[in-house]
Image (spheres, rainbow, N blue to C red):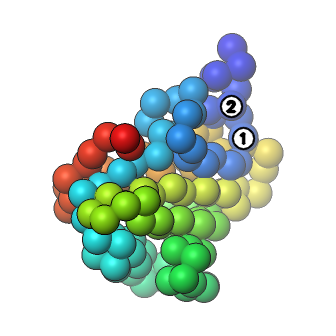
Amino acid sequence: MKAFISRYLNTHSETSEQHKDTALITHYYKAKHDEVFRAVEEMFPSPSEIKAVSRERGELTITYKGKRRAFVVATIIMVRPFRTAVDFSVTTDSGGPVDFGYSRNLIVQFYEQLDRQFTAVDPG
């Protein structure tokens, strides 16, 4: 029951190394940091707006404008040569206390896009 509530009855979702929801576990790619960073930047064309870019910290903040509006923080970190980790944090601006899984589904879509561009690898 708690998993259902946390998945559908909130306005925020984020990924982590050991998330209970397997779709929200940090993804690792066999690619250079700059390649992955550029790909994440390109995932947010107009009307979405990139608000801040910090290549040193590997962070992008985006105002996402799709079916619903959302605030997205993408973190891209090179953990070793040709191994780059990507995490997302999404908070929807639904106007209510719940987004019915929209923030979670948005993260899944982002990872699917990156999975098509880069080879996914194990964290180890």
Cβ atoms under marks 1 and 2 closer than 8 Å: yes
Left or right for 25, reference 14: left
- Relative to 43, residue 49 above or below: below
- The location of residue 29, given as percent across then percent down, is 30, 55
Q: Residue at x 24, y 57 (%)?
A: 30
Under tag 2, what secondary structure?
A: helix
Left or right for 41, reference 8: left
Left or right for 108, reference 67: left
- The location of residue 119, given as percent across then percent down, is 20, 53
Q: Residue at x 62, y 46 (%)?
A: 13
Quote the CA–CA distance across marks 1 and 2: 6 Å
Please state which amino acid type lies under the numbered disc 1: Asn
**Residue identified by numbered label 1:** 10
Residue farthest along the right direction in this orientation? 97
- The location of residue 88, given as percent across then percent down, is 54, 57
**Count of marks, rendered view:** 2
Please state which amino acid type lies under the numbered disc 2: Ser
**Could you tell me if residue 73 is visible in this image?**
yes
Near mark 2 (Cα within 10 A), the count class, few <14, some 14-19 or many ≥20, is some
Q: Residue at x 64, y 22 (%)?
A: 3
- The location of residue 58, given as percent across then percent down, is 52, 74
Instruction: Tell me the quarter of the picture where residue 18 sits.
Output: top right
Residue 18 or 79: which is nearer the viewer?
79
Screen quadrant of the N terminus: top right
Screen quadrant of the C terminus: top left
Under tag 1, what secondary structure?
A: loop
Residue farthest along the top direction in this orientation? 1
Q: Residue at x 70, y 26 (%)?
A: 5
Q: Which mark is residue 6?
A: 2
Instruction: Tell me the quarter of the picture where residue 44 sits.
Output: bottom left
